[in-house]
Structures are given as structure tokens and as C-alpha cells.
Image: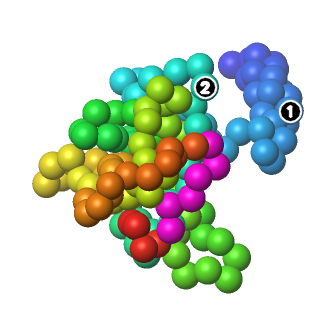
Amino acid sequence: MNRRPRLLIFAAAVALLGGCGPGDFAGAYDLPLPGGADLGPHPYRVVADFADVLDLVPQAAVRVNNVPVGRVAKIDLPDGGWTARVTMLVNGSVHLPANAEAHLRQSSLLGEKYVQLAAPATGSGAGALTDGAQIPLSRT
């Protein structure tokens, strides 16, 4: 069998993959999931600190009253920190108080993990959750 077509295909694949820099493509986590929440034209970013994120993954759903309103963009461990920092993108038309809470939930016994955003369980909501807002460990 002729090796020339295989070499051409291999060379093309190397050239294609070689053009991807370290920050260009992070693998499957960069691909959008079908059926995910509509982020709308102006989503906002919210960061929440959790003592334990269990097996939450990037692209997991973010919900309000069990309705998908966003997705987890990134999960990382801050330098010198002992808590997980979860960055979420939320649809810009979703309005939550600035003192909102974030909780990890599971859709069923063997189902996916997701982040549930909600107004505080006690007291009233104050202000508005905006782009760049942080939900501290005390409210997760």
C-alpha cells in the first residue's frame, strides 16, 4: 500500500494542531454542550468559593429555581488557598440580589452536579448581583 497519502494526512494534522497555542484550545471543556442554558447577548461573570466542589466540572449547569440560566466556566484553586473557586457565566437577564447564595446540587441519584443560585434563605435580598460579583465561602 502506498504510504504517501498517509504521510500527507499526518503532515496536515500536525500543521493543524501545531497552530494551536497553549491558551487557544483547552480540549473538550471549550466545546459548547447541546441543550445548555442560553447565555444571551450579555452574560455576566460570577465567582463563588466552595469548601468542596465534589465532582463538579466545567460546562456544568448553573440554575435558578431549577431553571438553567448559565454554566460553569472554570474551576480552579487560588494560589495558597484551600477552597475551590468556581467561575460561572449567567444570562444577563437573570436578576439576583447581591447577597445571593450558591449551593452544589445533584439532578438525581446518579445525575449531574450543578450550581444552584438563590436569594438568601433568611432576610431579604439587597442590591443586585453584577458582573464580577463574588460569593464568599460563608454563602456557599
Q: Which residue is mark 1?
A: 19
Which residues lie in the magenta part?
131-136
* Picture residue at 62% right of the left edge, 43% below the top: 131
Task: Please tell me which residue lies in front, 130 or 115.
Answer: 130
Q: Which residue is mark 2?
A: 42
Residue at 64% across, 49% down: 132
| Residue 85 falls left or right of residue 122 | right
Q: With respect to residue 80, does 42 lie above or below?
A: above
Of badges 1 and 2, the one in the foreground is 2
Q: Quadrant of residue 78?
A: bottom right
Residue 103 image position (x, y, % from top left): 33, 59
The amino acid on which the numbered mark 1 sits, given as a three-letter code, is Gly
Q: Is residue 66 above or below residue 79?
A: above
Q: Looking at the rendering, which quadrant does residue 101 occupy? A: bottom left
Residue 66 vs 82, above or below: the answer is: above
Q: Check the image and report above or below for 129 versus 103.
A: above
Q: Nearer the viewer, residue 123 or 130?
A: 123
Distance between mark 1 and mark 2 Cα atoms: 30 Å
Specify the amino acid type for callout 2. Answer: His
Residue 3, how many percent across, how many down?
76, 23
